Each structure stands twice: as structure tokens, then as C-alpha cells.
Image (tube, rainbow, N blue to C red):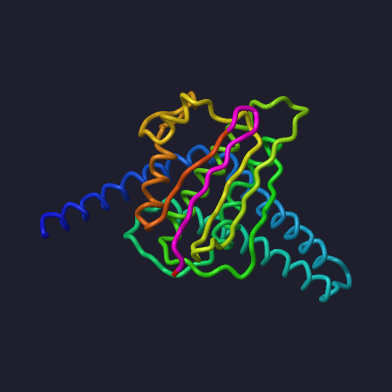
């Protein structure tokens, strides 16, 4: 029993290390989008600061107007700080820490990180999230990693669609009949052919020219480590849907 427990601990440690590597890879690929996302609040801060200076230098400064501009500066600075903090939390290697969480909040967190990439690739995002879902007991960073893997896979699948064809990703959340939480990430891309479907969960298998081939494999392992399941359905020219189910807290 002690040998088996030791083996399980080693397997979990190895999974955490692999997950950390894929997180670094994800953030590296998203770096340009994150830089653009940070540039928006920083530009706004610069603009509002200059406006404040100009207002102070007038003969009769308007304190109400100045307070309004300073509040906007504070809001933009907080936004920039939140982006950086979330990046740090996402990429840092950390001891496994589980807590109760709301799956819809985790989905929104991931969408915020991916929104620039979605816009750059002309992808329309649709959220169909069921309200008042039961809480889940998870490592929040790891579940966010799974969500981001699935979202980015869908974006990659949509990149090569004809320009006139609408590119759409739909994320669903709901409670199942046995009181588990199901999340679906669906795209209207070209789908996955039968040969690729047999290999897609295999480590190091990838359809991307510069991919590591670890995204789906790691995602499946992370979900299974949370006593859940991950699976998918795909039809050529109809798109692909990835599902995962997690037990409630």
C-alpha cells in the first residue's frame, strides 16, 4: 500500500510538472495578445494623466471633472494589475491547492485572457452558461488551463476557414442529471478526420506545425485527476465539440 501511494504521489507530481510546461507554452504563444491587452489600459492611463495635467494648469480647474478623470486612471491601473496578476498566477509552478469554485467564473476568467486572440482571428464567442450551478472543488488554475487549451484548439481549427464563413465558438455549462457539472467547447470548424480522432489524445501527437502535442493529453489527465472525464465529438465540415464533466463539491 505504501509503495502504491508513493507511486501515485510521484505520478501527480509529474503531472503537475507537465502541466506547468504546457502553461508556459500557452502563455508564450499568447504573448502578443497579452501585450496588446495591457497596452490598452496603459495608453488610457497616459491619456487621462495628460488630461489631468492640462486641467490643473487651467485658470479655474474643475475639481469634479478632475476627480472623474482620476477615478478613470485608478480603474485602468487596476485593470492592468489584474491582467498581470492573473498571468503570474496562471504560469507559476505551484503546489496543488483545491478550493470551491464557480465554473462560470473560471470560464469568464479564461475568456478575458483569450479575447484578444479571438478578435484577431475574427472568431465570434457565444456563452450559454446555466445560472446558479453547484460549486466544484478543484485546482482552479488547472481547470482554467484545460479551458484555455480547448478554446485555443478551437481557434486554431477556425483559422483556415474561408474569410466569408462565420467563425464561432460556443461554450456551454450545465448541471447533469446526476448532479455533475458539464462544460462544452464547440466550434464550427472543419472537424477532425477519423485517423486524427484515434490519435488526438496521444502525447506528442499534434496537427499544428509548431505544436507540442501535449494540450489534449494534459487536459485529459488534469480532468481525470479531478475525478472527471473528458471526451469529444467531431464531424468533418461540421465542427468539433470537447466535453468535460466534473463532480460537484
Count of numbered marks: 0
**In this rendering, is residue 238 above or below 180?**
above
**In this rendering, is residue 141 above or below 33?**
below
Q: Quadrant of the N terminus?
A: bottom left
Residue at 63% across / 39% down in the picture? Answer: 187
Q: Closer to the camera, 189 or 109?
A: 189
**Image location of residue 166, percent across then percent down:** 74, 35
Q: Closer to the camera, 234 or 42?
A: 234
Q: Quadrant of the C terminus?
A: bottom left
Is residue 245 a member of the stretch shown in magenta? yes
Horizontal arrangement in the rendering, residue 20 relative to residue 31 (left or right): left
Magenta stretch: dominant secondary structure: strand
**In this rendering, is residue 86 above or below 242?**
below
Splitting the image into 4 quarters, where does residue 5 fall? bottom left
Splitting the image into 4 quarters, where does residue 121 fall? top right
Magenta residues, start to end: 235-248
Residue at 77% across / 66% down in the picture? Answer: 69
Splitting the image into 4 quarters, where does residue 130 fall? bottom right
Amino acid at each position: 500500500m505504501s509503495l502504491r501511494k508513493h507511486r501515485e504521489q510521484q505520478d501527480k507530481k509529474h503531472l503537475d510538472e507537465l502541466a506547468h510546461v504546457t502553461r508556459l507554452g500557452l502563455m508564450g504563444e499568447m504573448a502578443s495578445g497579452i501585450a496588446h491587452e495591457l497596452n490598452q489600459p496603459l495608453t488610457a492611463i497616459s491619456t487621462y494623466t495628460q488630461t489631468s495635467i492640462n486641467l490643473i494648469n487651467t485658470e479655474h480647474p474643475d475639481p469634479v471633472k478632475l476627480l472623474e478623470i482620476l477615478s478613470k486612471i485608478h480603474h485602468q491601473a487596476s485593470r492592468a494589475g489584474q491582467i498581470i496578476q492573473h498571468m503570474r498566477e496562471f504560469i507559476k509552478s505551484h503546489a496543488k491547492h483545491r478550493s470551491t469554485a464557480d465554473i462560470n467564473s473560471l470560464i469568464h476568467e479564461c475568456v478575458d485572457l483569450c479575447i484578444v486572440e479571438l478578435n484577431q482571428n475574427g472568431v465570434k464567442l457565444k456563452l450559454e452558461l446555466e445560472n446558479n450551478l453547484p460549486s466544484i472543488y478543484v485546482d482552479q488554475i488547472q481547470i482554467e488551463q484545460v479551458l484555455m487549451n480547448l478554446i485555443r484548439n478551437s481557434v486554431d481549427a477556425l483559422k483556415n476557414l474561408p474569410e466569408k464563413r462565420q467563425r464561432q465558438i460556443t461554450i456551454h455549462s450545465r448541471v447533469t442529471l446526476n448532479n455533475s457539472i458539464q462544460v462544452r467547447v464547440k466550434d464550427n470548424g472543419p472537424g477532425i478526420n477519423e485517423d486524427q480522432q484515434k490519435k488526438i489524445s496521444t502525447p506528442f501527437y499534434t496537427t499544428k506545425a509548431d505544436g507540442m502535442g501535449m494540450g489534449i493529453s494534459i487536459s485529459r489527465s488534469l480532468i481525470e485527476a479531478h475525478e472527471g472525464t473528458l471526451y469529444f465529438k467531431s464531424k468533418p465540415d461540421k465542427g468539433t465539440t470537447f466535453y468535460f464533466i466534473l463532480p460537484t463539491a
